[in-house]
Image (tube, grey):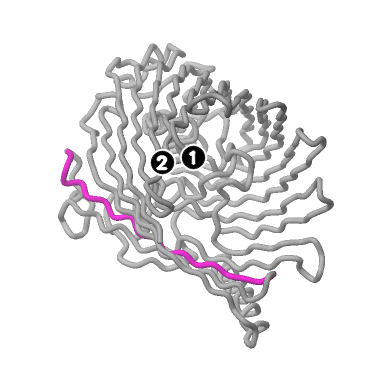
Amino acid sequence: MKKYLLRAFLLAAVSIVFVANAYAEIKVDYGAAFRLRQEIWDDAVDLGTSQADRNFIRLRTSVWGKADFTPDLGAYLRLTNEAKDYALGPFKAYKTNPNRDNLDPDELVIDNLYADAKNVFGLPVDLRIGRQDFIGVYGEGFLFMDGTPGDGSRTFYFNAARVNVKVNPCFNFDLTYITDPKTDIYMPSIHPAVRGPLYVDNKKLLTGSNEQAFLVYGRGKLLDNLTIEPYYVYKTEQPINGGIDLTKLKLNTIGARALYSINSWNFGGEFAHQWGEYDSGRDRTGNGGYVFVNRKYDAITWKPEFDLRYVYLSGNKSSFDVAHPGNDKVNTWDPLFSRNPYWNELLIYTLVGETAKFGGPIPGYWTNMEIAKATFKLNFTPTTNLALAYQYLWAPESTKGLNPALFSNSGTSRGHLPTAILNHAFSKNIDGMLQLEYFVPEGFYAVKDNATFFRWQLQFRI
């Protein structure tokens, strides 16, 4: 019933826009983008404990169109496909590919589809309803970045209704409702894959469970150089198959982000507290946040920048035997909608082995983590920059009961992770990137095989 209501609501919103502006001058814009990537994963999934290395090509194509019926009414549509060619590496796509070859054609999906209404009824209220991205909308993306982590960086969308209320020039807030199911039940897709653990009923597995959330997010400018962004989130997650608790989770998250800038210096951070319970009665709490300081030196050659930050995400030692769950409290941080390469790319894959009981078989469930990270960036030209970073990672709690081939179940030091990213824009329509990450594991893991993640990318836009 919910999927039909959402479709009807979206159809009604778009229809109203069209009817109301049938005789108006419509401004139309459109474009396309193509992203070519090669990725090499060397022991990145399980630190060499099995044959999970990959060397493959990713080909993402998107086409989009936008219609502005008036300055206050509009609509947007984007279609996306990301085919993958696995012929270069040991992973064979034919194991899950209906065509029985190394080319996974993926799906053609409706990536974005929403209607915009600004200054609704003449009030300082803006509305966006439909499938939309939240990148850059809610702070750095600590809690809201990717609504579809199961398909990697193919899409980032949320099925949502977002209302922005502008109280005054210094304060505004959002009221947002999100409904993100495990697979796309709201929109059709073309040429769905039919096999493999990341597909369900011919649909890509987009997230670990059926998830819904309600968000209140404020943005306040207290001083010329001080902003505060308080928020509250209520989220529900359906049971994970084989998970920590086979009942529904109802979770509250309250927190705030702050940023203070003065004389090219930036100081900031974010902290959130979580509390809630499963339908079984088991409590769940968590704490997470980060602090940072950074600066850019525009008067120096190559305009160097640095960023220092510390990250804390609470964890839980107990394995919580699913067969005999008892009444143990879960103190593990829930990343909500930020399961993506937020802190680094390489480690999100090794996380699956320790976090599948919380978030299913999907990478990026950042939890039980502390990170000290230093980044140094050089801007050689306005179109070329190099970012070098070093991370030391450890866990607040050692693990218990995890795969002994991969995890020591005693140590807390995760290890060292240096990274390098080179970006270059060849023109306003073409850019490229080289990325290298290297992980040196320590006592948190039972193995000491170093891991490497390498990527090159070209991106074209018209």
**Does residue 46 appear in the picture of this structure?**
yes
Q: Residue at x 67, y 29 (%)?
A: 271
Query: Which residue is nearer to you in this view: 418 or 282?
Result: 418
Residue 53 quadrant:
top left
In the rendered image, residue 90, in percent from the top left (x then y), is placed at 17, 38
Residue 23 quadrant:
bottom right
Q: Is residue 24 above or below residue 239?
A: below
Q: Residue at x 64, y 62 (%)?
A: 128
Q: How far apart, in angstroms, are the residues tagged by discs 2 and 1?
A: 8 Å
In the rendered image, residue 126, in percent from the top left (x then y), is placed at 72, 62
Q: Residue at x 80, y 71 (%)?
A: 121
Q: Please say whether residue 77 is one of the residues in the magenta stretch.
A: yes
Query: Which residue is nearer to you in this view: 276 or 417?
Result: 417
Q: Please say whether residue 287 is one of the residues in the magenta stretch.
A: no
In the rendered image, residue 83, in percent from the top left (x then y), is placed at 29, 55
Query: Which residue is nearer to you in this view: 330 or 22?
Result: 22
Checking the image for residue 339, the label placed there is: 1
